[in-house]
Amino acid sequence: MNDSAPKPEAPGALDFVAALRGAAPYIHAHNGRVFVIAFGGEAALRQDFERLIYDIALLHSLGVRLVLVHGVRPQIEAELAARKIKPQFAGDLRITDGTAMECVKAAIGRLRMDIEARLSTGLASTPMGGARLRVAGGNWVTARPVGVRNGIDHQLTGEVRRIDIATIREVLAQDRIALLSPIGYSPTGEIFNLRAGEVAQAVATGLGADKLIFVLNSDPDNWKLADETGDAGQLPLGEAERLLAAKSDTLQLSAEDRALLQSAMAAGRGGVKRVHLIGADPHGALLRELYTRDGCGLMFYSDENYEAVREASIEDVGGILALIKPLEDAGILVPRSREQLELEISFFDVMVRDGTVIACSALFPFPQNQIGEFSCVAVHPDYRNSGRASALLLRAEESARKLGLKKLFSLTTHTPHWFLEHGFVQAVIEDLPMQKQRIYNYQRKSIVLVKEL
């Protein structure tokens, strides 16, 4: 037997390595960031709730600074039923009298201890082995009564007045997980029953959290919220609000989910740049949403730079090379060395999504001929057929006009129909600038296409 012969790969080994490498940019990007994660009391009733806890523990181990906010609605309902007390609501907002408040206290105390116990697990046979998480909580939420609305006194149902952000920051700096329950206190010593989503929204806004994540009972992937946009996973906040308003009657959401969704919108308007909605499924939705390029839920973003087209810089060279290398290997693009690309980088535009180059193009002007070459057009496979190449062409046309150019030309061997569909017409080699004619590769037999501007 030849000991030097390569050993066969274990089944799934390459998939594991590829997945880990694919997650690496997000591991680096999320390290040290502040995430607020909110989940309703329904999530805690699921048989697989511990898996969510395991994933939260893993986030902490990967360097994410975590604030957890839990809901408690079904637990309160169970306490009321056990005491034979009829729940009272005005719309979907609970009316909390003194008797109901005793049920709120009991439900929150029991659930909070259960969450803390699960976060304290350290058995080597579980994903929590060696985690050694430290959890902190306190009277960080100051509240006030909702008061009388539409003639109904909501009594001890309250709303957030102020969050002790400074203390929460101290907790996070000590590498602890901050755990908040949906209750608040008044300066006069009263206790108020709050909505978990409102608490999460206020904390995320106050901290300037990098992400606010809501774990819902329903699966946002099934909402079909933005199929017509071509990018159902990520939406600008304004577009998300429009679509949600249009589909509000058809979305079968629980009262808890609807309240969390309203808080998500408010958080985006309040300055939280990324708000994520995921379902509480047993297949690691939280990790997939945060550590894969397109996730598995919905993300609303208020920052304009989540996906942007801009001039390329020297820092984009690696991303462009990774994008065009498969096309060069397939003979679709003419190979470029790193040195050549670095010299030409000022002629390139890139489309960047969450820090990753997903499309690129170049415009090489020939001012003496009043013509420019539109070339090196590449779009990542995951984002093709979504209008991104067209957007790069429009940008190139605008840039060409500013340079005083009258025409664009392109050379292609594989995609002439795309150019024809975008206003180019087939031309001949003699229509090219003389500098380009001299270096035309007759072996490639590239089709010449020209567009009037």
Image (cartoon, rainbow, N blue to C red):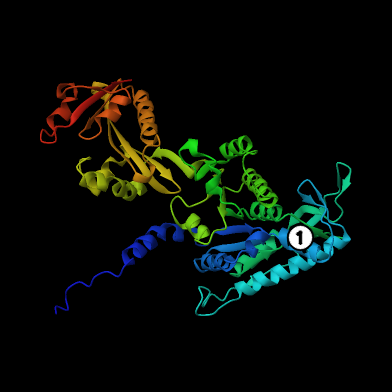
The relative height of residue 363 versus residue 293 in the rendered view (above or below) is above
Residue 167 rendering spot, x and y as whole percentages:
69, 64
Q: Quadrant of residue 439?
A: top left
Would residue 223 be seen by someone viewing this image from the given angle?
Answer: yes
Number of labels in the image equals 1
Residue 399 rendering spot, x and y as whole percentages:
37, 28
Q: Is 442 left or right of 374, judged from the image as shown?
A: left
The relative height of residue 163 versus residue 147 in the rendered view (above or below) is below
Residue 332 rendering spot, x and y as whole percentages:
22, 40
Q: Quadrant of the C terminus?
A: top left
Q: Is 109 left or right of 249, judged from the image as shown?
A: right
Seen from the viewer's position, the closer of residues 45 and 60 is: 45
Q: Quadrant of the N terminus?
A: bottom left
Q: Is 37 left or right of 311, judged from the image as shown?
A: right
Q: Which residue is mark 1?
A: 77
**Amino acid type at mark 1:** Glu
Q: Quadrant of residue 423?
A: top left
Would residue 365 be seen by someone viewing this image from the given angle?
Answer: no
Q: Residue furthest left?
A: 443
Write the residue at 65% across / 45% down: 270
Mark 1 nearby-residue class (10 Å; few <14, some 14–19, many ≥20): some
Please tell me whether mark 1 sits on a helix, a strand or a loop: helix
Q: Is 384 left or right of 412, judged from the image as shown?
A: right
Residue 442 rendering spot, x and y as whole percentages:
10, 33
Write the residue at 66% across / 59% down: 42
The relative height of residue 439 versus residue 324 in the rendered view (above or below) is above
Write the residue at 67% across / 50% down: 254
